[in-house]
Image: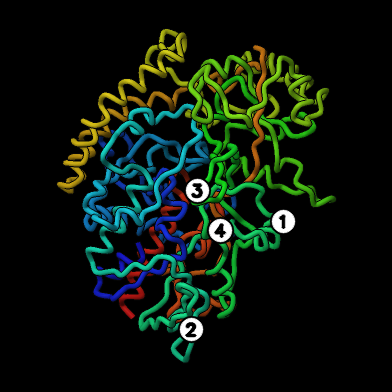
């Protein structure tokens, strides 16, 4: 986005990517962007929004004492403009959906701020399509978004794959030069500030002069054991993002005197490592998202105790998992176990296994809770006692310990047979319903892909929205009214199952402090001329507050746009 923003304003732009493929974590993500007051399909969604509501939400809960209001206002004002810029300059269309903000029940929250990428036709990229990082497997069990249909669509790219592909095509069309396997190692400085970068390419150092500026947009440092141990208390036992996030930009910014902020913050995410799953030769873990909000499951630590509301956003749960004991410094909940029973196994897909299907070998099975605990190294008395207390309350749809199921966001991801209830095939014949959905998706996938590809190539976003938003809204809006019982159920049907869940992050947040234009600041608050930063390396605009689905990507996109705009004008 930074490159595209600068190029359309006449700048000559070079993109340097350290890895062989482009896109980083964004490419393997859902690709959503969280855009307050976007104004897309508001009549169909039956909603409204305003900058004031967004400001109330972002600056609530005491964040007005921490965040820079000028930066927040720049984000709120610019994000909708960037969404429209994307549609004007690329083949991407945004699809607004029903999706509660992650802190869904505070003043200013909305259920309609997330935009998902529409389909992208990869043929417009030509040979450059091979440069975009493909998606990875998901661990999502149930989702109000009809993923079973979306995953069956062929011949077009979806989600983050589509977004990165569209941005790349737009850049190439504007004359941007893209080099992969070119790792920036240090910033060049002079009287005019930052004047270029040194690049390691094929083992040789090359010097690249930049007359207008250098924009750091490398992602975070979650892949660096040294940086995570130093700044986050411990390294991550598993990786959720792909290779390349080693903190190069953080180090380079520090070397030129940038003020570093939010260095102890991350976008937290629980993950599950399935044996043998890799990306580019490196183990990569599944995200743990909606599975936690379904009934008949809990999460416990090695003492067999619940430690949090399992159904909150992954960022909030991951933060609890990474909390250190103030006296010992240890993180007692960094490695925990997701416990569930045969009801869960028979009714929900999990780790790509269909309802009732075979799980990968990292899922432990036992006939009793005591046996399950012993196999996993969990205190048996603690687990049995926790389940004994939990079951009667869960049967009544209550959680007096952590209030699971009380927020809109939590209920949204619960068990949702919104049209037929207990008469839904997913309720009384989940395995057959799953097979039927796969068959339908396989049958309509090629046709849907051709139709969507044609619409995408025509670059008619409004037509795309008219086709998709009414249908998606009818399917997803009823999930806002799911009952608390959709997230709670007793664990009382043997056999029992457990899978290890470990705390990780989809990206770190710490990096150089930036202003409302994405310019890097020094400790005195003065601009370092010629240096900009955006995304997970740049500025911590919300200091780790995760607004909603797409709340990380939109910060990179928005401040990348502003940085490119400002650099081009120098």
Instruction: Answer with the quarter of the image where residue 449 lies.
Output: top left
Q: Secondary structure at mark 3?
A: strand
Its colouring scheme is: rainbow
Q: Residues within 10 Å of mark 2 (few under 14, many from 20)?
A: some
Q: Is residue 70 visible?
A: no
Q: Residues within 10 Å of mark 4 (few under 14, many from 20)?
A: many
Tell me how far mark 4 sits from mark 3, CA to CA: 23 Å
Tell me how far mark 4 sits from mark 1, CA to CA: 15 Å
Residue sitting at 18 percent across and 35 percent down? Answer: 451
Point out the frontmost of discs 3 and 1. 3
Q: Is residue 107 above or below residue 354?
A: below
Q: Which residue is mark 3?
A: 279
Q: Which residue is mark 2?
A: 188
Q: Residue 377 versus residue 31: which sits nearer the camera?
A: 377
Q: Residue 476 versus residue 380: which sits nearer the camera?
A: 380
Point out the frontmost of discs 4 and 2. 2
Q: Which residue is mark 1?
A: 233
Q: Secondary structure at mark 4?
A: loop
Tell me how far mark 2 sits from mark 1, CA to CA: 32 Å
In the shown orientation, is residue 191 left or right of residue 453?
A: right
Tell me, for residue 509, which label it has, or none: 4
């Amino acid at each position: 986005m930074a490159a595209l923003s600068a190029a359309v304003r006449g700048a000559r732009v070079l993109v340097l990517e350290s890895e062989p493929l482009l896109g980083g974590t964004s490419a393997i993500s859902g690709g959503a962007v969280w855009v307050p007051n976007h104004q897309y399909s508001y009549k169909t969604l039956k909603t409204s929004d305003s900058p004031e509501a967004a400001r109330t939400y972002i600056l609530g809960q005491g964040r007005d004492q921490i965040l820079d209001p000028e930066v927040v206002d720049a984000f709120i004002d610019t994000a909708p403009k960037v969404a429209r810029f994307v549609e004007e300059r690329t083949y991407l269309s945004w699809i607004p959906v029903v999706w509660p903000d992650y802190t869904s029940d505070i003043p200013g929250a909305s259920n309609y701020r997330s935009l998902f990428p529409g389909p992208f036709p990869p043929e417009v990229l030509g040979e450059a399509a091979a440069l975009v990082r493909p998606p990875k497997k998901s661990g999502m069990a149930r989702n109000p978004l009809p993923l079973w249909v979306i995953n069956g669509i062929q011949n077009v790219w979806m989600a983050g794959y589509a977004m990165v592909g569209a941005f790349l095509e737009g850049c190439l069309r504007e004359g941007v030069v893209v080099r992969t396997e070119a790792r920036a190692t240090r910033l060049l400085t002079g009287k005019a500030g930052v004047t270029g970068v040194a690049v390691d390419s094929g083992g040789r150092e090359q010097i690249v002069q930049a007359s207008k500026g250098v924009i750091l947009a490398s992602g975070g440092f979650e892949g660096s054991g040294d940086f995570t141990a130093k700044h986050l208390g411990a390294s991550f036992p598993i990786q959720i993002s792909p290779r390349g996030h080693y903190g190069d930009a953080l180090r380079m910014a520090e070397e030129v005197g940038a003020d570093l902020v939010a260095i102890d913050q991350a976008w937290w995410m629980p993950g599950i490592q399935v044996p043998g799953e890799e990306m580019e030769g490196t183990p990569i873990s599944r995200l743990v998202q909606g599975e936690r909000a379904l009934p008949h499951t809990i999460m416990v630590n090695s003492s067999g105790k619940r430690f949090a509301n399992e159904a909150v956003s992954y960022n909030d749960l991951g933060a609890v998992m990474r909390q250190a004991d103030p006296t010992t410094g240890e993180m007692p909940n960094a490695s925990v176990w997701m416990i569930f029973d045969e009801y869960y196994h028979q009714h929900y897909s999990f780790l790509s296994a269909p309802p009732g299907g075979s799980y990968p070998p990292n899922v432990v099975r036992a006939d009793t809770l005591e046996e399950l605990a012993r196999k996993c190294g969990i205190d048996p008395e603690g687990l049995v006692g926790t389940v004994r207390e939990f079951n009667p309350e869960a049967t009544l749809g209550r959680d007096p310990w952590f209030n699971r199921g009380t927020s809109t966001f939590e209920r949204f991801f619960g068990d949702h047979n919104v049209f037929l209830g207990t008469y839904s095939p997913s309720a009384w014949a989940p395995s057959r319903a799953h097979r039927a959905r796969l068959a339908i998706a396989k049958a309509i996938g090629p046709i849907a892909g051709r139709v969507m590809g044609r619409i995408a190539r025509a670059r008619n976003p409004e037509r795309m929205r008219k086709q998709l938003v009414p249908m998606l809204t009818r399917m997803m809006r009823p999930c806002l009214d799911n009952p608390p019982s959709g997230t709670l159920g007793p664990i009382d049907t043997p056999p029992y199952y457990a899978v290890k869940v470990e705390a990780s992050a989809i990206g770190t947040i710490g990096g150089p402090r930036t202003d409302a234009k994405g310019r890097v600041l020094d400790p005195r608050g003065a601009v370092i001329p010629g240096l900009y930063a955006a995304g997970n390396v740049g500025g911590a605009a919300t200091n780790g507050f995760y607004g909603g689905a797409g709340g990380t990507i939109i910060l990179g996109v928005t401040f990348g746009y502003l940085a490119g705009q400002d650099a081009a004008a120098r």
